[in-house]
Image: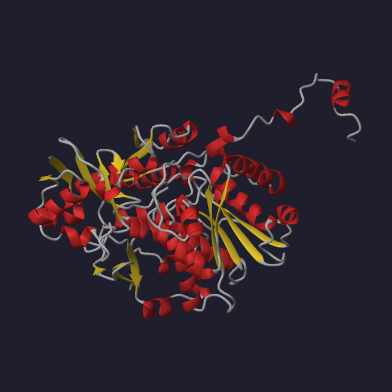
Amino acid sequence: MAVKVRVPGPLRRLTSGESVVEVEGVTVSEALDALEAKYPGFRERIYDADGQLRQFVNIYKNDEDIRFGSGLATELGAGDDLSIVPAVAGG
Amino acid sequence: MSAVKSLICRECQSEYEIQATHVCDLCFGPLEVRYDHAELERKVSRESIEAGPNSLWRYRDLLPLDDGAEPVTLGEGMTPLVRAERLGAELGLSNLYLKNETMNPTNSFKDRVVSVAVSWARANGFDTMACASTGNLANSVAAYSARAGMRCFVFIPADLEASKVLTTSVFAPHVVAVEGNYDEVNRLCSELADSYHWAFANINVRPFYAEGSKTLTYETAEQLGWRLPDEIIIPIASGCQFVKHNKAIQEMIELELVDPGPYPRLSGAQALNCSPVATAFKEGAPVRPVKPNTIAKSLAIGNPSDGKYVINIATGTGGVVETVTEDEIVESIELLAATEGIFAETAGGVTVGVLRKLARAGRWKGDETVVAYVTGHGFKTIQVVPDLDRYKRTIKPSVRSFEEAFPDVG
């Protein structure tokens, strides 16, 4: 299943500046594995030492935070978008 | 020489040159401004601060603005620290104080962070300010951009209170109403910040912006006679300011600005209907995002970036993170207004509501110095206050009519 991944500014040097890249995967976890295979360096920035998503990394499938779905096991369909977004402060 | 040294990752300690960026390239952790402590010790004293202006810029040496750069100011900070005798009597607290942040130029504590962010952005060559906002930040960024002569884009959830939209629009910014909740607005702005060379107050210039929060706690200590309180009650949205109050306390102790004494307990306040930090605190679990559904829109952040740090600090100082219901928020707005003459917005209702709840649960003996941060003005959220017609009587323009309506009041 081909999905588009939106890459945040701090990680674009891994993708030679590309802000959107395409990878294959039927779950979020698989898509992130494919991303690592294509652009090495993603894994250590997105996952902590225990293999969990880092605290400050938010991943959205289309408009929904995957933590509201099945997390890394969230299923993907053709045409879905994934966004990787660092946490921000607010008010 | 400015004491500002670098940006440092709060998680992995990687160091970066001073620039408009907010996350660590290596681990996504938040970046903090780091100062040269020898330089701070050389420059900062009670006397140097007391000789400064009657605004938060009296703490300029502890803020990240180059020496030479002109601050963008509307006279923010140095808000009243009010001794709350009547509310204190109601709650059994003889040394209760309220830091009345409704007195800032756009009537919320956000003027502290925005004054610092806009000053830094202008000094560093930006011509456009932007922000994602639950309302108060939009008010403030729009006002300070006008003051600085900068272009301004504010991004707000489309369902934001009309009063907050109006009080932003009057400063003539571009107001972008996004069909989504605050967390979605924030996400959009994070993505835009990667493509537009603008200073997003709470995103790429966040390390500088967030430093402005510290001044609220510096002032509290200065106004108590250079003494720290026993406990501070702080509202929590992203948790960003909570963390900075702790940093301010550490700096004041290290620089010997305050008299020696016990470390203050820092306690957090959330609305029950958006309480990811309080839930994680009580369960001893990681912070999980929630979908906010509260009238306290200025605190309605379901995905709080600093939640983990808030829990560490509350636990480490002996504080707690507590919640109040929607009804308690409104009751507390009325209680604060009726006892102390301060009209707070919903965030103030959350803070005073938590103060009341903790007091009733017997948290204090009664003589401790407790300070609650009342962070925004009630005019911002008037629609949440219930029908107050019970206070009103309509009469004819005659003495007889008055005396019929109010017998025995003379």
Q: Position of residue B35 (x, y in %)?
A: 35, 72
Image: B234 above or below B192: below
Residue B99 or B368: which is nearer the viewer?
B368
Q: Which quadrant of the view contains residue B85? A: bottom right
Rendered-image quadrant of the N terminus of chain A: top left
In the drawing, does residue B66 fall left or right of residue B264? left
Q: Residue at x 71, y 60 (%)?
A: B93
Image: B130 above or below A11: above
Q: Position of residue B146 (x, y in %)?
A: 38, 43
Q: Position of residue B242 (x, y in %)?
A: 47, 60
Residue A7 or B117: which is nearer the viewer?
A7
| Count of picture labels | 0
In the drawing, does residue B360 fall left or right of residue B317? right
Q: Position of residue A81 (x, y in %)?
A: 19, 40
Q: Residue at x 20, y 56 (%)?
A: A10
Image: B247 above or below B274: below
Residue B401 or B193: which is nearer the viewer?
B193
In the drawing, does residue B74 fall left or right of residue B356? left
Question: In this view of the protein, can residue B28 be seen by the observer?
Answer: yes
Residue that lies at the very extreme toward the top in this rendered image? B396
Q: Residue at x 66, y 53 (%)?
A: B356
Question: In this view of the protein, can residue B51 be seen by the observer?
Answer: no
